[in-house]
Image (spheres, helix red, strand yellow):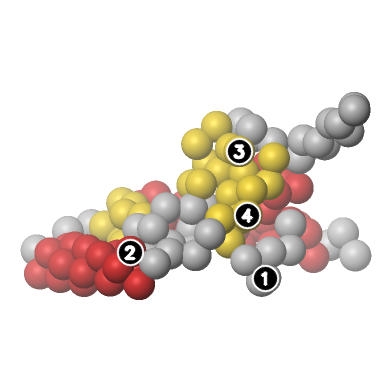
């Protein structure tokens, strides 16, 4: 039996992919649906987030911390969504500006 090869998607196609109902990651050009975390997993994430956020704010460190929801490009056709993401404030500002530019350029396509 012959299997049909899976079409690889580009990083740009991955960014435009509608995944409203589930969490996805890109691995070597293939979109992968990720399982939801267990209650213990979520509790650990919440503990780490709170502890690290308090440390960042309490020491006036130039970082931003996010509990998931941010894709991190780890290769040409690979993007992961870590449970926690810590970015230097300058990098966060640059990403926000880049996203605003991308959205405004996409708006002109229609």
Res. 85 image quadrant: bottom left
Please tell me whether mark 3 sits on a helix, a strand or a loop.
strand
Residue that sits furthest to the front in the current view: 1
Mark 3 or 2, nearer chain start: 3
Quick one: SS at disc 1? Answer: loop
- Disc ID at residue 27: 3
Percent x, y of residue 26: 62, 44
Between marks 3 and 4 in the image, the one whose residue lies nearer the viewer: 4
Residue 66 in sight: no
**Residue on which the image places disc 2:** 41
**On the picture, is 85 further left or further right than 51?**
right
Residue 72, compared with residue 16, is above or below; it is above
Disc 3 residue crowd, few under 14, some 14–19, many 20+, Cα 10 Å: some
C-alpha separation, residue under disc 2 versus residue under disc 1: 22 Å
Q: Work out whether mark 3 precedes mark 4 in sequence or the reverse, and give the earlier one.
A: 3
Q: Which comes sooner in the sequence, label 2 or label 1? A: 1
**Percent x, y of residue 53:** 21, 67
Residue in the foreground of this view, choosing between 40 and 21: 40
The answer to which of 12 and 88 lies nearer the viewer is 12
Residue that badge 1 annotates? 20
Is the residue marked by circle 2 packed among few (<14), some (14-19), or many (20+) residues within 10 Å?
Answer: few
Q: CA distance from mark 3 to mark 4?
A: 10 Å
Mark positioned earlier in the residue sequence (2 or 4):
4
- Above/below status of 4 relative to 104: above
Q: Are marks 2 and 4 in contact (CB under 8 Å)?
A: no
Query: Residue 71 at what x, y percent from top left?
Result: 52, 52
Instruction: Say which residue label 4 marks.
Output: 33
Q: How many marks?
A: 4
Residue beneath the point at 64% across and 48% down: 32
Residue at 64%, 33% (x, y): give it: 28
């Amino acid at each position: 039996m012959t299997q049909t090869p899976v079409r690889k998607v580009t990083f740009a196609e991955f960014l435009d992919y509608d995944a409203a109902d589930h969490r996805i990651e890109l691995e070597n050009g293939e979109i992968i649906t990720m399982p939801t975390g267990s209650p213990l997993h979520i509790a650990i994430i919440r503990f780490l987030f709170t502890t690290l956020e308090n440390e960042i704010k309490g020491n006036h460190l130039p970082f931003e911390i996010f509990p998931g929801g941010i894709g991190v490009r780890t290769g040409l056709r690979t993007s992961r969504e870590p449970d926690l993401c810590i970015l230097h404030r300058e990098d966060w500002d640059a990403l926000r500006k880049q996203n605003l530019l991308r959205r405004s350029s996409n708006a002109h396509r229609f």
